[in-house]
Amino acid sequence: MGTADHSARARNFEFLRVSGFDFPDSNEGAPVFSQLGDKLQEVFKDLRGQGKITESNINDAMRQVRLALLEADVHFQVAKDFIAKVKAKALGEEVLLSVSPGQQMVKIFHDELVTLLGGDAAPLNLNKPARILIVGLNGAGKTTSSAKLARFLKTKMSRQPALIACDLMRPAAIDQLATLAGQVGVPVYQPPKGETDVLRSARAAEAWLAQQSGINVEIYDTAGRQEIDEPLVQELKRLRDYLQPQEVLLVCDAATGQQAVSVAEHFHGALGLTGLILTKLDGDARGGAALSLRTVTGRPIKFAGVGEKLDQFEIFHPDRLAQRILGMGDIVTLVEKAAAEIDEKEAMRLQQKMMQAKFDLEDFLQQFKMMKKLGPLESILGMLPGMSQIKDLKVDQKEINRIEAIVLSMTPKERRKPEILNAKRRLRIAKGSGTQVSQVNDLMRRFEQMRKMMKQLPKMKGLMSRMGGGGGGMPGLPPGLGGGGGGGKMPTFPGMRR
């Protein structure tokens, strides 16, 4: 590791300690691939430490990687074939004789991981009339994923989707879809109560669609079961044959591991899937399903659900997931999120105030709002290179809400001039925010520590540039999160309690 990288990581870690992030000892609640990523990074760390790569230490490394993949619930044949491909390339002369064999190994592993996950992102076939059939077992998230997909098509692709309820088995499914459609702002077809014939319902939906104007994507939410059975398969086959959809997407729960792979095999054999939607990638699943599904079904993962909210739905990018697994971060996704959610002019204004050491609590509140737009802080920090090595970073949402309440309880003058916050003012602020004076004092202490750190940012930026560490920032990101300010590119606000 270079001196600049080491220096930046050390500052990042120390900043997190000052800001109050929690570093628990256990791995409980870690995001998908966290444990797999940790183990793989340990393997590569050992390889980088070798002066020379030999067949012997490659064999040792591949043995550890194979165990890590199996522990992550990757299908055993997929793991076996993957290791064989990596090993064959790793034993090539260009790696054994390379100036940086450890780095070459990481590149080989990354490239093969991307291939395993499907290569490039797979687009939807939206040729008119665009019909998408959503299938899967109960509990996988079909109805929610249908609504999320509708929202994505509407907001990200400027389409005009409609949702059609075809789940006539689960009593609350139709009401749930209607509620979600209202939240997303798209029309929804609801069959009459008591309807039991899915084809009759589909024909009625066609008549309803003919009366709508501008609809160019039809999303059909279908029935599921606790497990695959023949009546379910036959019903879905009849519906597929009648609709002739361009896309048949299977919703798979990442938390079910090998069961998801088995389910995908059965559905693909029966219906001829065109792609998959992988849900609950924000949970603590081992993640092996994502690494196995493409190989087992031969069909791409097209979308990923990364949270419960309707906007937490993303195109599945194999290269970006591979980078996250290997601890390289995912700056591209982070920049995309920032570009969509953050006012760049406001971000630049805050950056200038930081660089001039004039950052106050008004600015803090504004940046706080920017950060909240990007989503859960754990997931945002996980997109930063090297942050995966800080184990199981936790953010206390109650503490964040408490801090926001404290700042909002201040007058505009107090936020602009924190130095006037005497004991009397702090007591009033504590009462107004429902907190203790000690908590107000703790926030101000951490805020002052942060401001002192900001005064050093211009110096650190120049130092990092001279040492090859960059520091120029990236367009679209708020200050302190790669948007300028140099050095560690970390969130520049306190707010999380250890």
Image: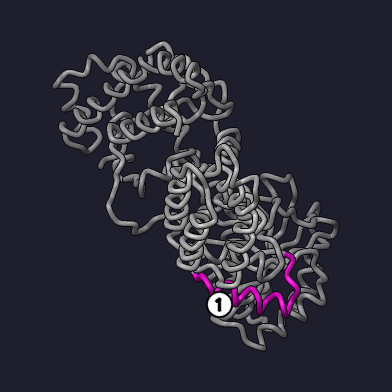
Q: Nearer the viewer, residue 347 or 216?
A: 347
Q: Nearer the viewer, residue 35 or 42?
A: 42
Task: Tell me where residue 187 appears, x and y as whole percent.
Answer: 69, 57
The residue that disc 1 covers is 171
Q: In the image, is 11 to the left or to the right of 440?
A: right
User: Which residues fall within the magenta stretch?
Assistant: 256-274
Task: Tell me where residue 411 appears, x and y as whole percent.
Answer: 30, 21
Badge 1, how many Cα within 10 Å: few under 14, some, many 20+? few
Q: In the image, is 213 to the left or to the right of 417?
A: right
**Amino acid type at image mark 1:** Pro
- Residue for point 50% across, 71% down: 256
- Residue for point 34% across, 57% down: 27
Q: In the image, is 143 to the left or to the right of 14?
A: right
- Residue for point 68% across, 44% down: 156
Residue 221 showing in the rendered view: no
Task: Tell me where residue 477 appears, x and y as whole percent.
Answer: 53, 30
Q: In the image, is 71 to the left or to the right of 219?
A: left
- Residue for point 25% across, 35% down: 433
Q: Main secondary structure of the magenta part?
A: helix
Residue 191 colored in magenta in the image? no
Task: Tell me where residue 349 appears, x and y as whole percent.
Answer: 50, 17
